[in-house]
Structures are given as C-alpha cells and as structure tokens.
Amino acid sequence: MPRVSVIVPAYRAQRTLPRCVASLLAQTFGDFEVIVSESGEEPSAKDDVPHDRRVRILNCPVRLAPHESSNRAAAMATGDLLAFVDADAYPRPDWLAQLVDAWEARGGAVMGGVACFGRRWIDRSAHLCKFDKWLPAGPPRPLTDAATVDLLIGRDLFESVGSFTATLFHADTDLSWRLRQAGHPLTLIPSAVVEHHHLHGLMELWRERYSRGNGFAYLWTHWSRPTRLGFVWRIAKSILPLRLASQSVRVLRHAWRAGERWELLVTMPPAVAGLYAWLLGESAGYLHLLLAGP
C-alpha cells in the first residue's frame, strides 16, 4: 500500500486537471497514489489526464461540494497519510517530499505555501485577497486555519476529528478549528509549494468573495454562538472600514514579506475590493441570522 493518498476533488476542471495530475506524477517522493474524485454530468478526467497505475478516478454523476468529494475519496484511500490538493493547483516537484518530512517532524496537520501560477494583474489581485496568509515566504510557523489547496494530515487523525463536516460551509476552516480545539498542531511549511491557477475575471472574483464571506458567517456563528449585540457589532465592524483596514494591513505585510512589493501598486486596489466583497457577504449572512432569530 502507498504511504500517501493524494486526493483531488474535481468539478468541471478540464482546463487544469491534466496539468495538476501531471505535476503530481512528477513528484520526487514516489510512495503515493492519486485519487481524483470528480462529480457532475460532465467528466473532467478524460483522455487528457495522464494514465498511470498510481491514478484512480472516482466518478459521481451528481455534483458534490469539494468537501463531500474529498470525504468520498478519503473513505477509499489506502495511504496512512492523506494529502489534499485542488484540481486548479500545480504542486512543485518536491512538494510531497517536504510535506511528509514536515509531518514526520511535527505531526498534526501541515500545509504548504501557495504561489500564483498566472502573471496577469487579476491573477495577482485574486491571489492576494484569497491566499495571502499562505504565501510561500518566511520560516515554518503555526496556523490558525489551513486550506485544502495544499494540506497533509494523518489518516487516523483526520478520521478521529470527524473528517470534513458536510453540513457546514468552509469545511477546511472548520476542520482546522476542530484540530486546534483538540490540541493538534497546524503548521505552515512555506517551501512546500503549489501554484494556484486563477481562471476568473474581476466581477467573478468579487462575486466569489461575497459568496465565500456569506458562507463564513454561518460557520463563525456556529462556533461563536453570538448574542444579538454580538451580531450587531460584527456587522458594524464588517461594513465600516474597521475589519477592512486590519485585513488590508495583513495582506500588505504578507505580500511585502513574500517580496511582492512593486506588484502591490497594481494589484492591491482590486484585492482590497475583494476583501470588502467578503465582508459584505459576511454582513449579509449575519443580518439574515439576526433577523431569523433563535
């Protein structure tokens, strides 16, 4: 049996999945299998995906959310370690070797750095407002939350904390919080890099950020159980520039550390707009929950 099962959830990923799988098959660490868990009526894993004995493809004609697709693949995985990567991310050759080494030294869950594949200004803007916390720069460090674009965890630990919770939004964030609540370390390994391929335009980015912010409101409420006054304060901070300012400073700090200093002049304004779209989505979610009552 392989040491690692690499899980790739896919939905309408024809443009990126072949390159993703090819990048996985080029890893310097060889003891792994790849499980592509695709869903939807239009398969992504057609003839363009490299054929290799290490690659298994699971098909589901009904569309699944990414975390549902990942859970389905994890249940059929044979490795002691589970690595998760998005279908629109391309791991560098030493990606898996670095994650396995880090996991052996630290345990818990380890996440690698996320670089931007494209060079368009919209690519850089999208990357800063979505992945600034995980840019491939700096030393290994603790995380408060990780993303399944680039994550490795022991199979036993994954199952013991309940895998991905299908009833909640932001399942990777929810998993991260459950791991930390149970006392397990969550560590960023910036040098274990995947390159994320952004495919959307500016308006698509803002709509996606609004939707993701709206979903986060429900997850935060599930964990925080705020009072009505707590909802009002959270909405006020999100609509007013209080949280936007702190998040913008965070993005600037992370981008500066990653050496993306000159690009900030072009990419920061739409990135800040993406951050605000998230906050507006959050506020709409909180308002809905506040008006809905207990």
Image (cartoon, rainbow, N blue to C red):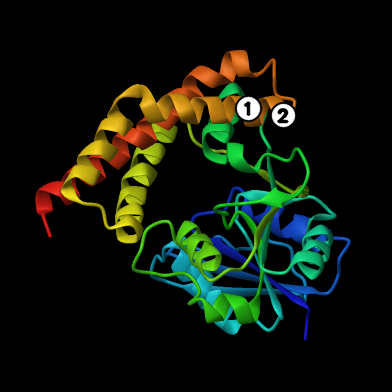
- The kind of residue on which mark 1 rests is Arg
Along the line of sight, the residue nearer the viewer: 137 or 6: 137
Residue under pointer 2 = 257
Outermost residue toward the right? Answer: 28
Crowdedness near tag 1: few (<14), some (14–19) or many (≥20) residues, C-alpha within 10 Å:
some
Q: Is residue 203 visible?
A: no
Q: Position of residue 284 (x, y in %)?
A: 23, 40
Q: Quadrant of residue 187?
A: bottom right
Along the line of sight, the residue nearer the viewer: 183 or 8: 183
Q: Position of residue 266 (x, y in %)?
A: 58, 15
Q: Is residue 169 left or right of residue 190?
A: left
Residue under pointer 1 = 253
Picture layout, residue 222 above or below residue 264 = below
Outermost residue toward the bottom? Answer: 1
The count of marks equals 2
- Kindly state the secondary structure of the residue where label 2 is placed: helix
Q: Position of residue 131 (x, y in %)?
A: 58, 40
How much space separates mark 1 and mark 2, taking CA atoms?
6 Å
- Kindly state the secondary structure of the residue where label 1 is placed: helix
Work out which quarter of the rendered image holds the C terminus and state it.
bottom left
The residue lying at 37 percent from left, 26 percent from top is 242
Q: Is residue 151 left or right of residue 205?
A: right
The residue lying at 43 percent from left, 30 percent from top is 274
